[in-house]
Amino acid sequence: MSSRVLSINQSIIVQLLSILLCFNSFSQSKSEPIINGKLQLDSIWEPVVYLSHIPTFNDMFTMSNEMIIAEAKIDTSGYFIFPTEALPNKDNLFRLHVSKKDAPSASLIIGGNEENHIFFIANSRSSVFIDNTGSVGLFDKYILNGYKPNDDLEAINEIIKLSEQSDTVLLKKQFVEKTLNEQLRHIADTSSNAIVSLYALNNSKFETTYLSNQLFYENYLEKWKNEDSTYFRELRTKLPRQEKSSSTFWLIVFGLFFFILGFAINYYFSKRKSKSNNSHLKSLSIQERKIFQLIQLGKSNKEISEEYNIGLSTVKSHVSNIYSKLNIKSRKEAMDIK
């Protein structure tokens, strides 16, 4: 009897060990870094998903076969998977897209329900899960889980969507854009992830607000001075670093000086030209002055002829004399004389 109980206990132990080994194996397979997901596709789409590497933010909406680094079949349930061991060790920006059955694989649709791509951040050790089931369009709504920086990326996209709303009056829209751009700069300043930070900054209209926020950008470049990715190299070409604040001051001073100088020179020559024109106008006869006034109103020779009830040849003769006395060659020059 005791041997039978022992045998039963051993059998139970073996079964428990088998279950634990299976669970451990399953857990390890689940924790392996992968890019996977489930896509709900209409019949117009090819059941293949493409993965592209985006080297700079300027390349986000460009497409070529060279940018595609992998492709995966989408099974009947919508599932797909990419391994990540070939990806860079550091975070990079990637694009996932599908193509229509009658279109090339390297085709991009921007905007609308048929927009065929999404962006996400990944590296060789990250796991990303994408699910678009339940959305009206292909990627108008989707779930992007598994890697925290992508949550921040989606939060930035929501801010961008707000800034693109066009159903507000101009003044209110400008105020909203300014507020949202400030939020994006705040995210850029506080984020510890380089791609998230740059993505926020890149969408904050930084090139048009550089002078008004110059100290912020100088501190920003200083903070990320050791970052040497293609994304930061692109930024540095757009935001040249000012080594000394005094150089900026003198640039502004010289700029103002040449602006004032240019204005003064233009004013001088305008006045001189005006005086010259006035002296030339005095040389016109009464009839020529009347015809000149109609020329400046855009009247044709025929209309002038009808206005003053004189022959067309007479009008042409007066116009020729006017051109000669004013030293001009066309009606456009005549209309520019004040």
Image (spheres, helix red, strand yellow):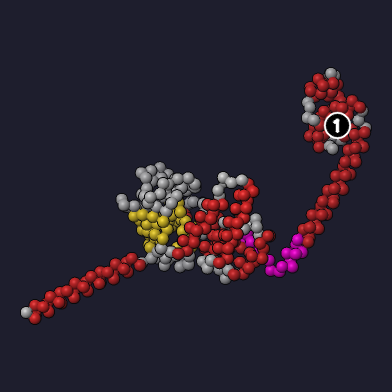
Residue 225, relative to residue 200: is it above or below?
below
Residue 302 place in picture, x, y as percent: 79, 22
Asked whether residue 73 appears in the rendered view, the answer is no
Mark 1: give few (<14), some (14-19) or many (20+) Cα within 10 Å: some
Query: Is 265 or 27 nearer to us in this picture?
Result: 27
Left or right: 15, with 49 as reference point: left
Q: Position of residue 170 (x, y in %)?
A: 63, 46
Judge left or right: residue 210 versus residue 116: right
Along the line of sight, which residue is nearer the eye, 87 or 13?
13
Residue 100 falls in which quadrant of the image?
top left
Pick the quarter of the image with the N terminus. bottom left
Where is residue 24 drawn, in percent x and y?
Answer: 29, 71
Q: Residue at x 40, y 49 (%)?
A: 135
Question: Measured along the vertical axis of the image, is residue 178 above or below residue 322?
Answer: below
In reply to whether residue 249 is colored magenta, the answer given is yes
Q: Is residue 297 magenta?
A: no
Q: Indicate left or right for 321 with 222 as reference.
A: right
The residue shown at (11%, 78%) is 5
Mark 1: which secondary structure?
Answer: helix
Q: Is residue 115 visible?
A: yes
Q: Is residue 167 above or below residue 238?
A: above
Residue at position x 55%, y 60% in the image? 200
Q: Which residue occupies 41% across, 63% down?
A: 146
Above or below, 284 relative to 18: above
- The quadrant of the rendering that contains the C terminus is top right
Q: State left or right for residue 241 relative to residue 191.
A: right
Dividing the picture into quarters, in which one does residue 186 lie?
A: bottom right
The residue beneath circle 1 is 323
Going by the numbered disc 1, the residue's amino acid type is Tyr
In magenta, the rendered stretch is: 237-252
Q: Position of residue 49 (x, y in %)?
A: 39, 53
- Secondary structure of the magenta portion, mostly? helix
